[in-house]
Image (tube, grey):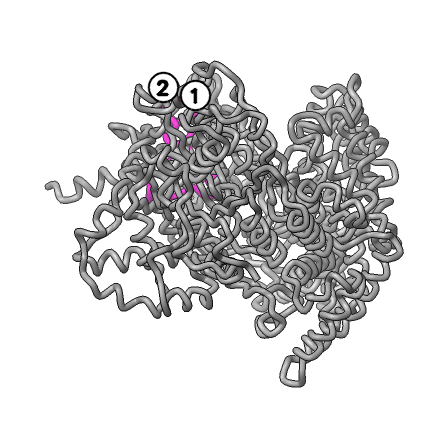
Amino acid sequence: MARPEAMRLFDIPAHLPFLDCLAAGVLLLHGDDGGAGRADPEALSRATLLLPTRRSARALREAFLRLAVAQPARGAGGPGRPEDADRAMLLPRMRALAGLSTEDADELALPVLLDLPPAVEPLRRQSVLTGFVMRLPQRHGGPATPEQAWGLAGALATLLDEIALEERDLGMLATVSPELFADRWLDRLARLVPEEHARHWQITLTFLRGVVAQWNAWLREQGLLDVGVRRVKALQAQAEAWERDPPAHWVIAAGIGVGGTIPAAAALLEVVAQLPRGAVVLHGVDRRTRGEVWDAIKNAPTHPFCSQARLLEDLAAEQDRIRTWPGCERVSHRAAPERRAELFGMALRPPEGMSAWTRREPDHWRPGLDGLSLLTAPDAQQEAVAIALLLREALEDPRARAALVTPDRDLARRVSAELARHGIVADDSAGEPLSETPAGAFLRLVARMVAERFAPVPLLSVLKHPLCAGGMERGAWLAAARLLERRVLRGPRPAPGVEGLRDATSAVLRGERDAEALAQANALLEALARALGGFTALEDAPARPPGDLLAAHLAAAEALAATETEPGGLRLYAGEEGEPLACHLAALAPAFAELPPIAPSAYPALFDAALAGVAARSVRASKGRDGGPHPRVEILGLLEARLLSFDRVVLGALDESVWPLATDPGPWMSRPMRKAFGLPEPEARIGRVCADFLLTACAAPTAVLTRAAKRGGSPTVPARWLTRIETFLAGQGGLALPASPAAAWAARLDQPARVAPCERPAPRPPLAARPEELSLSDVATLLADPYAIYARRVLKLFPLDPLDADVGRAEYGTLVHAALARFIRRLDDARAWPGEAAARQWFAEAAEAALAQAGAPPSLAAFWRPRLARIGDFVVAQEAPRRAANAIRRSLVEAEGRLALARRGDRAVTLIARADRIDEQADGRLAVVDYKTGKLPKAAAVEDGSQPQLPLEAAMALRGAFRGLPPRPVERLEYWRVSGGPDAGEVQGVRAGAAEVEELAERSLAAAAALAERFLLRGDTTFPSHPHPGRPSRSGDYDHLARVAEWAGAEDAGAEGSGGAP
């Protein structure tokens, strides 16, 4: 039991810069009365400071430096510059607990830890546990895939650490060997899973018993300790060593306990506080809350002072016995408003203290709003823009330091990009996920490419990656990749595998008789196959050890990364992310060796899971700019920001489910089980995060709280702390958080003084560049969107087929037309009607031949066959009465025709067509038929010339423009809808009767001739985009080139603005 009167417990108030105060106090303790770093250097260098994170240890070194140079500049009203320092300072030893990692514990305990077995490597532990978890049957909640097992093993490792660190039922740790530890807690767990708990948890318990037994046996066999057990042992050993032999130098534990303290760490703090030359320095102790409200805080895990209250209870210390740290008065000139911490504490009170809200004291609370503001942006991007502007503005003061503190990595990346826009590279504490670095992404893409059997999208993601060269010169490789993309990979997917790519390449390029392109593409495919070696087939392959798959994967990636002159490994692991990636992969190789064999198809997802959660420090936020991070701007996570202070701090993404994150008890224990077992509530994380929020916001002279009204396109809810603060202020005479002007700055940043959208494009190409032929579809396009004809026929721009395109409507239409053409030709050749049964058989054979010619995938062919059969029934039903009565003399299918449409001088325009079908009837008259697999054109569109195809075919037939067909009257125009759906087909007549058809045909031909004369035979005519709003183009392939979205909106707005004019 601690003796409170013998303990040195101190506090640094929340409104003061913690580390500067700490450094000043340490110098005082070592004889620096002047406050300028003139402490006894030898004694100071022997002191030990325990801090919560490595970043706080680095920041404390900077605080000592500021104090060392502060004396010469104090008369100037602020801290001095490093160049003002006239001597060096020997700093104390600083040890960071940093989440109580094994390495940090080793740094603490000195020789006393030499007797402890080493801790198991975390990756190796997760691999071994993954193998155990994979044995749980899927019907009992076991994982369906290895990557799921990897995730469950990670959660199990976390649970094992929690149990060890919280020392549940482990007062016997000193006498019980670590390997018996799990058996004891499992015995207790068994009593917590009685009949009333779900059967799922009964199964979980049974499985846990088996897994932990196997895990302990494995640890004994390897001579290792679990990570959590060794951490506790290390801290206990250090506490015992200092208690038994107190050090002669100062030992100061500072800032520990803000986010909760495990029992072993609390015991260490108790020992430190009672050392003859020891001290525990707390941060932001709430000295105003007392009595039942303070007691309630101890039982409110979501409250920011809950961890603090519990720590003081463990130390048997009262708030009155905590003294202010002696260095605080040295840096009072950098303090934030003291009333702000009091304001936040009142707003965040538990329900037992809410009665204090009824007191209206606006004058008392108004000073707490000094330097505090709220920014609400419309979305996450605008929030990032505004934050970047706030940080940039802070740098106008050459001594100011600014930071963004947020748990939202997406916001951090956005702000980093926006700061680069201002020429600022921010030091992002979280770094960059290894999986998202260029090399990490390349490794993942290689595995995904092989797993998806070289499908076009993953294949090109690898081939065009900056790290990929396949042993060739990079320029030649990239040229070959682009050729393969344009000529082979666009459109339907080739057959799987490298062989499928070779076959598709040969089929396309040999057909085009392009030997040079074929050789270029084949060289790339040969290099690809050679680099991949045995890492080419993951589908339907027998199970293989993950370690072998990893080795083959890395060998393939290194071979793909090689150039003619540089080895792949040197390129792959170069750069600032290369070393951490190489180290992680080096640790992953022996870890994967512990896993049982898996299906190779599951390997890419397992590799992704093994790479997730690992970060590499990076300054690529510079977006290509030279130089390192700015020395006065940082982007921090919550843990990294702990104890740090800045002149301006922005607390970003204050929205529920972001700050704080939603709580989750994990897959291995339910909330009731955790509570009964004595583990911390999942909601305790909210309290820790709230403490970080409060202390960070209170320590900065200027603090800006930001949130987005929408995130990811969905409305957000303000963080609960922000809501509490706003609600409390509203009850104090209508006080409110001041609005930050940065939201308005962000809105104006990219807004020009005057918006001048482009005009509707109307190019005027020279007459010689204008086409001299028009297809029937070109006529309709020229009428609706002349710019599209300009882009296609003058500029020769053609839309690229999509990558890995689905074989869909267009291919189905081509297939149906081909089947109908084969069938009608066979009917024509037969001369006599064969009967309906034989005709159906003929159509089925025509359909199969068309399917074979199209090369339709088997799955798609199976889907199309029933539709084709229904089309066959419909067509036979239409043909039977006509053919049986000999009403059709012959039928021309896919008939080609040409007709001189217009002439001016020595320049002429020719109309070209391919008619689906023209029937010559027994009386010599013609019937023109057009097949449609989609919707039929409306009769009004045909009559007004918007859909002129069928009437123009009639006009050409009237003039004998089709090959093999002399001029004849046209009796009928018909559309046949042949979709093959439940309503298989429909015949829609446009006009009947030779005179009626001729009138429509001549009118349509005259309109087409006028269009041709206007646009193609005159050099002064422009090609405007969409000149008739009521006649939209059938295809918008060129709308982006014409910038339709820009000028159309402006024209619409102008039309609306003048709509009321007479």
| Secondary structure of the residue carrying numbered label 1 | helix
Question: Which SS type dominates the magenta stretch?
Answer: loop
Rendered residue at 75%/46% (across/down): 113
Looking at the rendered image, the quarter that the N terminus falls into is: bottom right
- Horizontal side, residue 800 vs residue 753: left or right: right
Q: Is residue 476 visible?
A: yes
Answer whether residue 942 is visible to the viewer in this image: no
Q: Is residue 1020 magenta?
A: yes
* Vertical order, 774 against 114 (above or below): above
Q: Which residue lies at the image location 45% right of the left edge and 49% below the top edge? A: 692
Whether pointer 2 and pointer 1 mark residues with C-beta atoms closer than 8 Å, the reply is yes
Dot 2: what SS? helix
The picture places residue 590, in percent across and down from the top left corner, at 83, 44
| Amino acid, disc 2 | Ala
Q: Amino acid at mark 1?
A: Val
| Nearest to the observer: residue 102 or residue 877 | 102
x and y, in percent, of residue 530 in the image: 86, 31
Report the residue marked by disc 2. 73
Q: Which residues are magenta?
A: 1009-1036
Q: Say which of 660 and 376 sits in front.
A: 660
Vertical placement of residue 242 versus 754, above or below: below
Quick one: label 1, few (<14), some, or many (20+) residues within 10 Å? many
Q: Quadrant of residue 482?
A: top right
Q: Residue furthest bottom?
A: 195
**Label 2 Cα neighbours within 10 Å, binned few <14 / some 14-19 / many ≥20:** few
The residue at 82%/61% (across/down) is 216
* Residue placed under numbered mark 1 in the picture: 69
Residue 393 part of the magenta segment: no
Q: Position of residue 667 (x, y in %)?
A: 65, 65
Horizontal side, residue 570 vs residue 301: left or right = right
Pick the front one: 706 or 647: 647
